[in-house]
Amino acid sequence: MNYLLKPFYFLDTMISIIGAGNVGSSAAFNILRFRISDVVLIDIVEDLAHGEALDMIQSAPAIEFDGKIEGTNDFSAMEGSEIVIIIAGEGRKQGITRLDLMNKNAKIVRSVVKEVVRFAPNCKLMIVTNPVDVMTYIAYKESGFERNRVFGMGNILDTLRFRSYIAMELEVSREDIRALVIGEHGDSMVPLVNYTSVSGIPITDLLTKGQIKKIVNLTRTSGSDVIKLKGSTTYAPAAVIAIMSDAIIRGRNRVMGVSTYLQGEYGFSDVSIGVPVILGRNGIERILELELRPETKKRFEKSVLIIKDSIKKLK
């Protein structure tokens, strides 16, 4: 009996993850662990996705999950997926920026999107491959999907890091921190200090300007800091993928910073970049336009121009 293809019980939804490396497999396990959806894990490396799925099946009794876990190198297995998540591509290494990966990963994303359009034309398409804002732009253009169905993970991860550093500085629970980051998922990201609070208390009332500046800088370098220490980031991006998937599958309408294609919002068009949205059953339910302070607006404009310049250099 092929236990990968004949599980005992199927949930009502399916999520396909393309790329069975550390982030993809960890994200798949989180989705299973929180019973968000059945999962199909796809990778072109023969037996990698199959092996990861088998490993998860063996853990399923411990997490009390009876749904479908399939690993394959066959793109047709994504048929019927509610969400397709593209993680395939070369990851960041020490000394390499997200934008350095652009043209190599652009080829991979273009080829994968063609398979998504072929086999899962009604899905919501989540992009994780770096540089995520540029890859989201490519996926939107290549897929022909409505823009609410194509979005990139990035600023939610930045926000988790921002919240973590604030909690560490104040020695309070991370759960009580509310924050938002917009802009590029990269060095020009814009943590919104004036929209950040601890149980409703503005952080400007609790931290000095010097402390806030230190936290913002740590947030911007946090991904690189992890890569220097262990070679890659895994758990935080995998957790974010599960959070986003949960918001969509369960229609939770969560407010999150998500890379999306702009059509005049914030004064910009023809670019994908992180802005606050309501994420729900239809993908991006609505883009939220905030009134940005002059200095914050300048930083956001600089971030947009960096992404636009990168798009011009695409091959």
Image: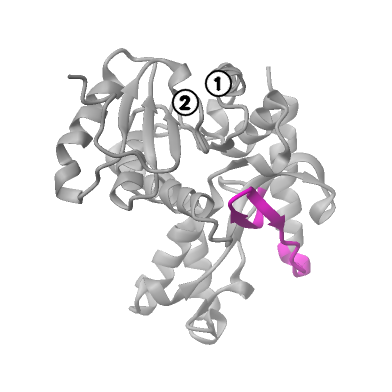
Q: Which circle marks residue 68 in the picture?
A: none
What residue did someone put label 1 on? Answer: 119
Q: Is residue 176 above or below residue 49?
A: below
Magenta stretch: residue 277 in it?
A: yes
Q: Is residue 223 above or below residue 54?
A: below
Q: Which residues are magenta?
A: 274-296
Quarter placement of the N terminus: top left
Magenta stretch: residue 276 in it?
A: yes
Q: Position of residue 53 (x, y in %)?
A: 26, 29
Q: Crowding at label 2, few (<14), some or many (≥20) Cα neighbours within 10 Å?
A: many
Q: Residue at x 26, y 27 (%)?
A: 6
Secondary structure under the numbered disc 1 in the rendered image: helix
Q: Position of residue 86 (x, y in %)?
A: 50, 31
Residue 51's image quarter? Answer: top left
| Callout 1 amino acid | Phe
What residue did someone put label 2 on? Answer: 78
Residue 3's image quarter? Answer: top left
| Callout 2 amino acid | Met
Mark positioned earlier in the residue sequence (1 or 2): 2
Quarter placement of the C terminus: top right
Q: Position of residue 96 (x, y in %)?
A: 47, 31
